[in-house]
Image (spheres, rainbow, N blue to C red):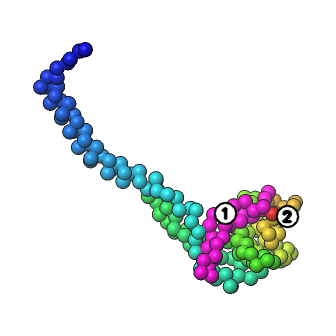
Amino acid sequence: MSSQKVSRRQFLNYTLMGVGGFMGAAVVMPMLRFAVDPALKANASGDFINTGLKISEITETPTRVDYKLEVKDGWYEAEETRTAWVYKDEEGGIVALSPVCKHLGCTVNWEGDEKHKNEFYCPCHGGRYEKSGKNIPNTPPIGPLDLYESQEKDGVLYLGNTKTNEV
Ligand code: FES
């Protein structure tokens, strides 16, 4: 068994390094946490946002609803406006469709073209969708309009993320 003696100089070196390292960590850790923390915070994108629209006001005719939400991306915070086309289906269920056209992303409008009643219409290239959001064959869109997840709270419509519309 080997026994190594630690000299006074080595002992002082180790002690100073230990204390210095501890003090350095105490200074650096809060700064590191401050720098990284916003990026680690839970993403609120899964939250449902209050649209301010009363469920009782929703009819069977698609109505445009604009609502605001706060968006946080790291240190960047902004208010964003989202839009949905909302109506009740025959069973009284809420349908909330994204207005983003599945061709090149323009905004669709309900009965946006006089020639095509009872349809969503995209003015950019004449894209057409049925009321359910299903794209009409032989028009530019390559898929149905996305569907918002929806919830009712206290008689008011809340909307979440969009999902694929299985129509
Ligand atoms: S972007 Fe809607 S039809 Fe082209």
Which of these two is toward me, 146 or 103? 146
Q: Farthest residue toward the front? A: 1
Side of 64 relative to 6 (left or right): right
Side of 105 relative to 117 (left or right): left
Q: Amino acid at mark 1?
A: Thr
Residue in the image at 87% along x and 61% along y: 137
User: Does the rendering let one see residue 17?
Assistant: yes
Q: Which mark is residue 136?
A: 2
Q: Residues within 10 Å of mark 1 (few under 14, many from 20)?
A: some
Q: Pointer 1: what residue?
A: 162
User: Does the rendering let one see residue 66?
Assistant: no
Q: Amino acid at mark 2?
A: Ile
Q: Secondary structure at mark 1?
A: strand
Q: Say which of marks 2 and 1 sits in front.
A: 1
Residue in the image at 70% along x and 82% along y: 58
Q: Is mark 2 within 8 Å of ligand 1?
A: no
Magenta residues? 142-166
Q: Quadrant of the N terminus?
A: top left
